Amino acid sequence: MVEGIVYVHQRALKAFRTKQLKGIAQLPAEVIDKLQASHDPIDRELAKTLLTWQDNKAARGQSRGLGYEPREIRRLGAVQVIGSRIISGASGFDEIDPEVSYEAIVLRHPERFTDEVVETARRRLQRTTPQTRLSSHDIRLIASSRGKQKYGDLTEEENAAYVRVSATLQALGHFLKSQLKSPDGFEVRTTSGFNIKSGIRSYIPKDLWFSVSPRDSAKQLAGMPQLFMIVSERGIEYGYGASVSPSDFSQQSVKEIVRKAAPFVFDRLPVPNSAEAMAIQHDIEASGGWYYRRKHRLPPNQKEFSNLTDWLSYLRSAEGKMNAAGTISRYLQGDEIDRTDLEKVVTEMARIYQPLIDRDWNVHSATESNGGAALKIEPSRKAQNDDGSFEFAERLSKFLRLFGERRNDAFRIGDELGSAMENLQTWLEELPGVASRPTIKVRVSVGQGGWTKTPWVALLDNRATSTTQRGIYVVFLIAEDLSIIYLTLNQGMTELRNRLGQRGASEEMIRVAEATRPLIADLSAAGFKLDNLIDLRSDTGAAQNYEIGTITHVALATDNLPDDATISRYLEDLLGAYERVVGAGTGSIYALEEEPNGLQVPVPAEPYGIEEAHEELFLERADLERYLEIWRSKKNLVLQGAPGVGKSFIARRLAYALIGFRDDRKVQTVQFHQSYSYEDFVQGYRPNGVQGFERKNGTFYEFRDRAMEDKTGTYVFIIDEINRGNLSRIFGELMLLIEPDKRNPIWKTRLAYATVDEPDFHLPENLYILGMMNTADRSLSMVDYALRRRFAFVSMEPLFGSDRFRAHLKAHDVPEEVINRITTRMGDLNRAIESDRVNLGRGFRIGHSFFTPTKRVTDPEAWYRRVVETEIYPLLEEYWFDIPETADQWRDRLLRSADL
């Protein structure tokens, strides 16, 4: 019985849907098709309005049905239906769009409707038009966001400012268009690629803008000329642009269209000193405050030309056509923005510049200046990546030839090599795969102050790094003998080495590479190898670190470089992979793993405890347990010791062991120095980039907030060279709050720069501080008693006698005889240093990390001699600076042949 009822119900539902499809859904389509084909402009506009309404409903998951409109339009006609809907207020739209709606149609064709309909439409449109005002507060918020990289890093208030400004510019653009005599001949554009939820491909736009430009020639002329408004941290720039500078575009194909279109536009502007030009100049000068500029986005309120005649003459000159840009603009800044009615501003723009923008821009009518043929503007072959071109190979080969000729002379780049480097950089910057990624910056290096053995060409994503000293980046690495080039995804080593030491940095880079390769596994199908087996044919430390840090690579023989299309394909594949890596953030301990449904989820951090720390360190397990127990109790710990005892490396491993995971998100490192201040560490006022200052939170304050938000996690703040800073000045009120028994809201205190409405400040229980102190630095005074009372101190000893140290050397192919020499002679040296109580003492003993290789030692004798001569001996010279013969004697003893 139930099955029969269900069957009847399903049949009835299917019949109803069939009737609905035949009677309603098909009728709107037929009516819209007829309206689109009509000769009446109102019919055609109505068709666009109905389609837009359908699309908006579908986007919200609603039916695309349009109610009674299509039936009524077929029976009564468009004009009568629009009028009746306006009067009755029953048009069915959720929002009244100032561009596409019944009301908009009425105001564009008022002569076809009654006065009552026109007035009602105007009132309704005015009530629903978005705001057209901006504030200086919005500009300050945009300025405050400029120090951030990703759109997701914006504060809630900053994000709201971007949303407000974007909506206001869109409204102003449409309002300006409506003030032109023939608005249908123009189109409004707004910030390319900008989304209020995600920015531009997840990063922050350099500015927000609208432009109004001729519609018919928009594609051929790349949206030139235009009336525009740009909002940035500088303020609001607005006016008339004959052409936007090609350098403002990221895509090479668009740059070339602009370069070719600009002369066409310039030639169709009024002739300098003509009656038309003089009339326009009179209106501009009567309005006042306009500046004649070479391009958009220049510093405010300056001018390169005195009047319109000079400006027009420049545009028509060879220089002007080559630069392909020119504007007439004003700026609003500071409180002036709050006092300005922007609707009046754009109304004035439309009136003054109507003669300069409403002209014959029909590209295909340009016959006289083009030999009777229509002007054809296309991107060049290079922009289209045609096969068969070897421009990159030619530029790179010239660069290598000049570098090879000069590197044996004194370091001086010179004009010829400098030009070759610039040409190589320009080629890469203009390659579509690079130009379309505005966060990518290209750098070419042959060394700084001296020739490098391994020159390179790097492509850095500024969302990940701005230097080759840290982070992940794409780089062409050139072998020392210049015979081979590796296009690689690589890692910066310098900052890691400074923080973790050579051994720790090498291990960290290997770990990051292993975490990254699963994200870019598809590169193997594109010819890349997912390993670090490259050979730069150099024994320099820099070259070895490049080799260690390589994540993926493809080899290019310099005597058989591929064509431009192949280079472009390699770079496109590698840059696409680089984007995934930047998005996944594998430079931290979290990578991304793809689920079967295609979603990406974070992979939990690798567990890390006493066992893992003991495996990586030369310390005894009992010592590790003791250090961690002291730290958990005291909350604040200082590792003190002489150079080379591995303080940085140990500190990181202790932090991981305390946290329980190898999780770099929960570890923050800073280095104190004599200029470091409370404002850097806690809170203070900093320049805001718009000729003012604003309060900003310091590194420790921000890290404390992260710990406060994750009450169940453990967070470690590491301070290198803790005794180099003025501790009272840096810590301020925190000198009280860091005490272990003061880590709760009861002890909250007022910060120096706090406002009256802010809560008092305290530290959470889950934030631990780990300091590092060099006991051999003569430039430092004794540590402040207040610091000693709040921190526990443990001393790191040289471990030349450790079995684990010997095992490490043996594992890296250091022979037993050299191991014995190191342990015996360095032990003797440290005993001499310790016994010299007048000049040195226990705290000056030299640590074992000078002799901890990270790669296989191929020539142990040469390696040992290099360490002694370049690392140990300079330290001894500093130790015994007033008795240098002692340093010389110890150098000779360390280097003495084994058989003496």
Image: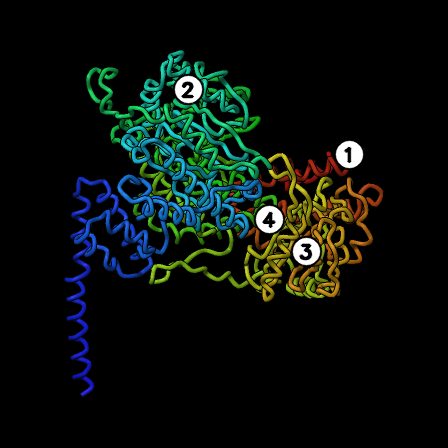
| Comparing labels 1 and 3, the label whose residue is closer to the camera | 3
**Element at label 1:** loop
Residue at 52% in and 30% down = 331
Identify residue for label 4: 500
Q: What residue type is labelled 2?
A: Ile
Q: Name the residue under label 2.
A: 280
Give 36 or 419, whichever is nearer the viewer. 36
Picture residue at 53% right of the left edge, 24% below the top:
289
Amino acid at circle 3: Glu
Camera-nearest label, 4 or 3: 3
Instruction: Residue under label 1, please give it.
Output: 881
Element under label 4?
helix
Q: What whole-number distance in Å separates the C-alpha atoms at marks 1 and 3? A: 54 Å
Image location (x, y in percent) of residue 42: 24, 43
Q: Residues within 10 Å of mark 2 (few under 14, many from 20)?
A: some
Colour setting: rainbow
Counting residues from the start of the chain, the first of labels 2 and 3 encountered is: 2
Q: Is residue 594 above or below residue 242?
A: below
